[in-house]
Amino acid sequence: MKSRTLRLPRPHLSGALCAAAAAGCLWLAVAGTADTPQDLPAAVLTAPFSASASPEASPEAPTEDDGVLPPWHEPEPLATPDPDRETAPVAETFLSGGEEVDGFHVKDTSGSGVDLLEELTVDPDVHVRRDGTPVVLFYSTHTCESFLRQDAGWYYTDESFRDLDPEKSIVSVAAEAAAVIEAGGFGVIHDRTVHDSPAFSGSYQRSWETIQKNLELYPTIQITVDLHRDAFGEEDDGTRYKPVAEIDGRQAAQIMILAGCDLEEDPLFPDWRENLHLALRLQQKGEALFPGLCRPLNFTQRNYNLHATHGSLLIEIGTEVNTLDEAKYSGRLLGETILAVLEDLAE
């Protein structure tokens, strides 16, 4: 296995922003701020994922033998800020901490009192075959979430960080993960249905309907992944943070896996321990393959449609000020991590 290098930790977020980061998707859904939905036309594209061949390289383009993975293209020149628009800084950070569990970390705010090390010993209730039948579903509740296009060290303060174009949004990141898993022999469905436009409110109800539709069409699905990108808010001077780690010499957006639980007397999510088993296994594999890529697993009293199956997960990749390239690279690394877990569990 190739050695992997982790960049030295960067300055951490302020206390207020750390709390916002730990809140993850809840912060995103409640606070709005930079992710205030815009009026965008609805668009739906639902289809089994099919990996397509990379564009052919030009005769002058480097190949894998040159140490550059295709597709290759000339880097875009850095943009000069529009003097008529206000900008603010982008700063890098590295998120770590939490409780150590067998070599990886968990931020446990669930109040459940479970022994995480003991839960790790339980095999996930996921039954898959490596025969091409669909076993993984990717979708995004907040489908229009997007990223910076360039690593210029600044962003426009009036930027919405939402884009209906799937090539510029979280949809393209999920496509990277799906391609890796399918290339490994496991069937993948990537549902590109837009759930957060034209209305942001009600996104989770609409994504629940997407999950149920796919489970009915493809009953072999065992794992559902709701892929998001996070947002941390900003400092008084407008600075926003992007969590990054260096993996194999390239900068990747850090990933956060969220595991929910339900401690109510009449729970909607009674089997949350089953989902926790898979989340722990995925976090463990990610740290083994790509040290530093994953932020601490966020174990909290939330649902976010995770009660759909025993293999339902919510995963956040980067923040709005990570670049799209950083996020897509992390999408591929996430795909490799899920693939490795599937290989361990295959019957």
Image (tube, helix red, strand yellow):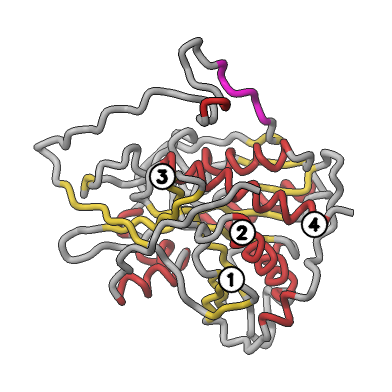
Residue at the spot of label 1: 104
Q: Please give the name of the residue rendered at 79% of the width and 74% of the height, measured from the top-left corner.
A: 122
Q: Position of residue 100 (x, y in %)?
A: 57, 78
Q: Amino acid at mark 3?
A: Ser
Span highlighted in magenta in the image:
51-56
Viewer-side residue, 228 vs 289: 289
**Residue 238 point in image, percent of width and height:** 19, 58
Q: Which mark is residue 146?
A: 3
Q: Amino acid at mark 2?
A: Gly
First in sequence: mark 4 or mark 3? Answer: 3
Q: Quadrant of residue 34?
A: bottom left
Rounded to the nearest angstrom, the CA distance separating label 4 from label 3 is 33 Å
Question: Viewed as shown, does residue 317 lie left or right of 94?
Answer: right
Main SS of residues in magenta: loop
The residue under label 2 is 286
Q: Earlier in the sequence, mark 2 or mark 4?
A: 2
Q: CA distance from mark 3 to mark 1?
A: 28 Å
2 or 3: tag closer to the N-terminus: 3
Element under disc 2: helix
Q: Which callout, 3 or 1, points at the residue further toward the start of the chain?
A: 1
Spatial separation of the CA atoms under disc 2 and disc 3: 24 Å
Distance from Cα at disc 4 to Cα at disc 1: 18 Å
